[in-house]
Amino acid sequence: MAYRTVFLAKLPFWSAFFHGFLSGVLADLIVNTVEAWINHYPLKEKAPVQRPNNPNVPHNPSLYKKPFVESFEETPLMVAVLTYMGYGILTIFGYLRDFLRQWNIEKRHIARERDEQKDFVPLYQDFENFYNRNLYIRIRDNWNRPVCSVPGPKMDLIERSTPNYNWTFEYTGRVLKDVLNLGSYNYLGFAENKGPCADAAIEATQAYGVGVGSTRCEMGNLDIHEELEQLVARFLGVESSMAFGMGFATNSMNIPALTGKGCLILSDELNHASLVLGARLSSSTIRVFKHNNMQSLEKLLRDAIVHGQPRTHRPWKKILIVVEGIYSMEGSIVRLPEIIALKKHYKAYLYLDEAHSIGALGPNGKGVVDYFGLDPKDVDIMMGTFTKSFGAAGGYIGGKKELIDYLRCHSHSAVYATSMSPPVAQQIITSMKIIMGEDGTTLGADRLRQLHENTTYFRRKLHDMGLIIYGNEDSPVIPMMLYMPAKIGAFGRQMLKKNIGIVGVGFPATPIIESRARFCVSAAHTREMLNTVNISDSWQSKYVRRLKYINETLTYYK
Amino acid sequence: MNFKNLREYLAWLYYQYLLITGIYVLEPWEKSIFNSILFSVIAMVIYTSYVFVPIHVRLALEFFTRMFGGQPESTMTLMT
């Protein structure tokens, strides 16, 4: 500061002012640039590369050992306009039908308020009830179809007919045999009633019976549960694990035991209802980041650490990042290496829900941690379900021994809910041993390889037909875009006529214009079965613009 | 997608129309209402264009020819 005053003393007043102003401004500029540069590259491990703004590209490719290819093609503009037009027309007819029902011109089948309740808050006037009455019920013969056999690669359905446009159903008496099952979450084909798993489950029923009759904390802790938990811990590569009777209850009853008031939960936009319910029940603050978008997550983490709790600005007690392994409506796989790098840098905890990915991803079937080649000890809480790949029911949580011991006493599901049924537990034990290869055969490795081949083949096949497929190249969940509401119903019915059973998904589960049909490939499907799926051009769902260009080049070179 | 005859092609086009407008999910009497309204609107548009478009086109052409072609005429008549 001394040199400045001496220097300025020799100059006239206006130049001194100018000089001081300029040096102050320049100093500010330099400091701001340096600060911005430092803040732009927060992680010390990363080299300063230019970050693309595209969320579909991994921001730190050096963390991934193999290419991470996801595609979520944008809705073509014409299709979006026509979809909105279709919804508009159906809304007008919905109002017409509601008017006819209100004035008793037409018979009413739906629940309605009684006359005494007319002055209270209306129960059935919101959009979801309107949608239910006027759109969902018109096409609801595509859902809740009764299955009367094992839901394996092929299944039997009871045929239903409706005399009044889906308000009521009757059985015709016929059974549709050998319908190809592309809707069950049967990734490794363990939904079968013959074979080693079924035999072991029969023996367990004869030894223990079917009901347990108590909770884990009282009299319901059988030795088969202990064996199951040790096996699950060994399978996942964690210290200890705990198994629960219901997968939904695992999420919704254990998150409240882990976090509470003063904690922060950062959950993905498209998390499952069980995770959302568990987060809300825990009364923690919930902040949502954009789906699989690491920039959004990092911004939320930085804001949380800098600003703390909302009014008092105290630091958060803990920050829990809740993500899923495979998101079943999108088919996308979580960017686990980047999340683990972020979690370690900002000292947060990670809750990974591997409902769809356990058993289905990874060279050894050990889930998304195995798929990326990471250390299971990096994930604090590994949760999963036994419903999808193991052909059973229930959920588990794996992690450090202190965590699981705490959950044994403090989780609602452990204290109040009945424990898992013995034949179900035995089914899981047998199937897990098959996957790990401990039963002495190569059945597990064969099934994992078959699933991977089926996934690649089916995705390639649908893509070559020109349909828009969402999701990662390696995920066995394949959503195919339909967009228009009438196509969900028509597609389901046409596929059933061809003896293929699929699941169509519409509004409450997906955004309103992005309706889709979701295929779940299984290791039990053979290539001939997958070849029977021939989606003809009557769908006009072939929205991929590249296909036209490919066809033109092919005809040119013929 | 090979159509054996015109009937099959027209049936396919009608199916696409049902799917895209969303009419497919409605009951037959609702489909008839929508089809009749749409048909009458299209018929009125065609009739109106048949009756009025030639008249408007002729008037527009006259307007433009008077604007550009009318001036040299008037100066010529003034000169002679």
Image: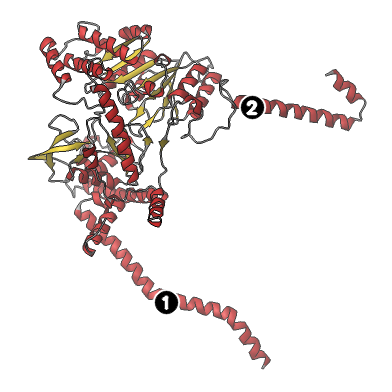
Residue at the image position 13 percent from the left and 15 percent from the top: A210
Q: Chain of mark 1?
A: B
Q: Position of residue A457 (x, y in %)?
A: 30, 37
Query: Label 2: which residue?
Result: A37
Residue at the image position 25 percent from the left and 55 percent from the top: B15
Q: Position of residue A96 (x, y in %)?
A: 26, 50
Q: Secondary structure at mark 1?
A: helix
Q: Amino acid at mark 1?
A: Pro
Q: Is residue B24 above or below residue B59?
A: above
**Residue A222 in sight:** no
Query: Label 1: which residue?
Result: B54
- What colour scheme does the image use? secondary structure
**Which residue of the protein is positioned furthest toward the bottom in this rendering?**
B80
Q: Chain of mark 2?
A: A
Image quadrant for the N terminus of chain A?
Answer: top right
Q: Nearer the viewer, residue A533 or A205?
A: A533
Q: Do residues under tags 1 and 2 come within 8 Å of each other at their CB atoms?
A: no
